[in-house]
């Protein structure tokens, strides 16, 4: 048996890689983990965490406005971009420190360097040129924003990475894309006082979500002042003499803004990793191909998280890492469960969703019952805000099983986490009906919708 420097070498210090390395080290394995940027990966450094902090910051303008309806007199308010950036950076530094200490306290070696595969068991550390060997290798290098290199002027644009560290808050921004990243940032910048235009070549934003959620959010965003341009896309971005940008679109429109942000999807971060040298297969998108146990075609090399292009969510990467540990180090073969994953879009209002959309369920089941409630939340009654909240349950008529649950409104993300547990347990509509309501709450609507709003039988609404 070959003697290796490490039992496990992890390439990538994001959520999935850190979890695999830390737990393996806690089990007594000799572990090294290499990261070329900062530990924490996309989620902690330039994704979920700073995004949610920015969402909170952008909501205060409405909070101040709503306060008047409840008797509060709020003096003139101002927003300071530099203060937000400094506070965000401090929190990210704290979280990065926790990731590092978790690895170190369990005995893993931290390597601040890019790592590239030489062969199936050998890794080269780019910073020093040193090579090390490992029995098993985990690749968890995540994803990266699609630069849309075919767009003339793409180099003048920013991605979500740069949006967290802009030297100053723009007065106006055009965001290209219709997915959750584009939608979330459109709401963030609008809330901070930026004039926002969202451009998307599709017919609707958030195309993979339930149609009621898409349409409800679209209306709410437009009502807030966000301009949404659909079935159009950018053909060219040019810089004007004054430093602003001029965007020309396919439909002949010219849009002048301070900043253009590309949110046109993410790509697996696999370039230059030495995958070919090690014989690791990738698909047409550059994602590492893995089996049900996150194993590549090379038996001792595994891949976790966004680099595999399965489900691009931080909790999924962590779950895949724990399944790897169970399979490889606990003699308990465990494949990741990617079914019924609850997810949230931190737009304003929020989206929380789990299971099938109405459209998907109608294709899968002979008949479905749809329970739908749209209402003005109680908090809006005194503030005078007109924004609506939406609750929706999609039920297989034959089994009465709830196959989809969807929420549009404040705290939708918090509610859908618990709905995820319920649907994972196979809850039926009768279980919802037997559950006592908590009053007065918005969530009580989920258990008080006793009659279906409509049914869909054989693809036809009845």
Image (cartoon, helix red, strand yellow):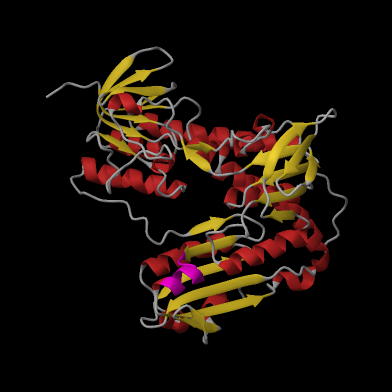
Q: What segment is highlighted magenta in the picture?
A: 355-363
The N terminus - image quarter:
top left
**For this view, does 121 lie left or right of residue 357?**
left
Residue 420's spot in the image, x, y percent?
A: 44, 64
Q: Is residue 447 left or right of residue 397?
A: right
Q: Residue at position x 75%, y 32% from top?
A: 238
Q: Residue furthest left?
A: 1
Answer with the quarter of the image where residue 257 lies: top right
Magenta-colored segment: predominant secondary structure: helix
Give the left or right position of residue 285, taking residue 151 as reference. Answer: left
Magenta residue check for 274 = no
Whole-percent x, y for residue 374 in the image: 64, 76
One can see residue 439 in this view: no
Residue 357: in magenta span: yes
Q: Position of residue 449 (x, y in %)?
A: 54, 82
- In the rendering, at what x and y percent does residue 381 appear? 75, 73
The quarter holding residue 443 reads bottom right
């Amino acid at each position: 048996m070959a003697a290796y420097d490490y039992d496990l070498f992890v390439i990538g210090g994001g959520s999935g890689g850190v979890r695999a390395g830390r737990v393996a080290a806690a089990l007594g394995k000799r572990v090294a983990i290499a990261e070329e940027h900062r530990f924490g990966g996309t989620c902690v450094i330039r994704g979920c965490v700073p995004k949610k902090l920015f969402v909170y910051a952008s909501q205060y303008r409405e909070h101040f406005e709503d306060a008047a309806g409840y008797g509060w007199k709020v003096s003139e308010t101002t927003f300071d971009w530099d203060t937000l950036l400094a506070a965000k950076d401090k929190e990210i530094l704290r979280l990065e420190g926790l990731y590092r200490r978790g690895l170190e306290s369990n005995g893993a070696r931290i390597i601040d360097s890019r790592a590239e595969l030489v062969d199936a068991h050998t890794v080269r550390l780019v910073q020093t040129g040193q090579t090390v060997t490992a029995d098993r290798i985990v690749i968890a290098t995540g994803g990266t924003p699609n630069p849309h290199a075919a767009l003339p002027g793409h180099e003048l644009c920013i991605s979500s990475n740069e949006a967290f560290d802009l030297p100053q808050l723009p007065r106006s921004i055009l965001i290209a894309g219709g997915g959750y990243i584009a939608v979330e940032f459109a709401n963030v910048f609008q809330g901070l006082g930026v004039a926002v235009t969202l451009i998307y070549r599709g017919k609707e934003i958030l195309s993979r979500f339930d149609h009621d959620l898409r349409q409800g959010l679209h209306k709410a965003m437009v009502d807030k002042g966000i301009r949404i341009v659909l079935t159009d896309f950018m053909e060219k971005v040019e810089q004007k003499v004054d430093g602003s940008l001029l965007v020309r679109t396919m439909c002949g429109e010219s849009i002048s803004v301070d900043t253009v942000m590309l949110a046109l999807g993410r790509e697996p971060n696999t370039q230059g990793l030495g995958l070919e040298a090690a014989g690791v297969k990738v698909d047409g998108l550059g994602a590492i191909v893995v089996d049900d146990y996150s194993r590549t075609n090379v038996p001792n090399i595994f891949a976790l998280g966004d680099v595999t292009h399965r489900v691009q969510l931080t909790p999924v990467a962590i779950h895949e890492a724990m399944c790897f540990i169970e399979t490889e180090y606990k003699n308990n073969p465990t494949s990741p469960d990617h079914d019924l994953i609850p997810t949230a879009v931190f737009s304003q209002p929020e989206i929380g969703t789990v299971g099938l959309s109405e459209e998907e369920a109608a294709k899968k089941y002979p008949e479905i019952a749809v329970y739908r409630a749209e209402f003005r939340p109680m908090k809006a009654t005194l503030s005078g805000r007109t924004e609506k909240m939406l609750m929706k349950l999609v039920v297989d008529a034959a089994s009465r099983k709830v196959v989809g649950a969807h929420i549009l409104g404040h705290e939708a993300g918090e509610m859908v986490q618990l709905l995820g547990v319920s649907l994972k347990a196979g809850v039926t509509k009768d279980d919802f009906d037997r559950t006592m309501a908590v009053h007065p709450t918005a969530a009580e609507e989920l258990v008080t919708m006793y009659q279906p709003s409509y049914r869909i039988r054989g693809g036809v609404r009845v």
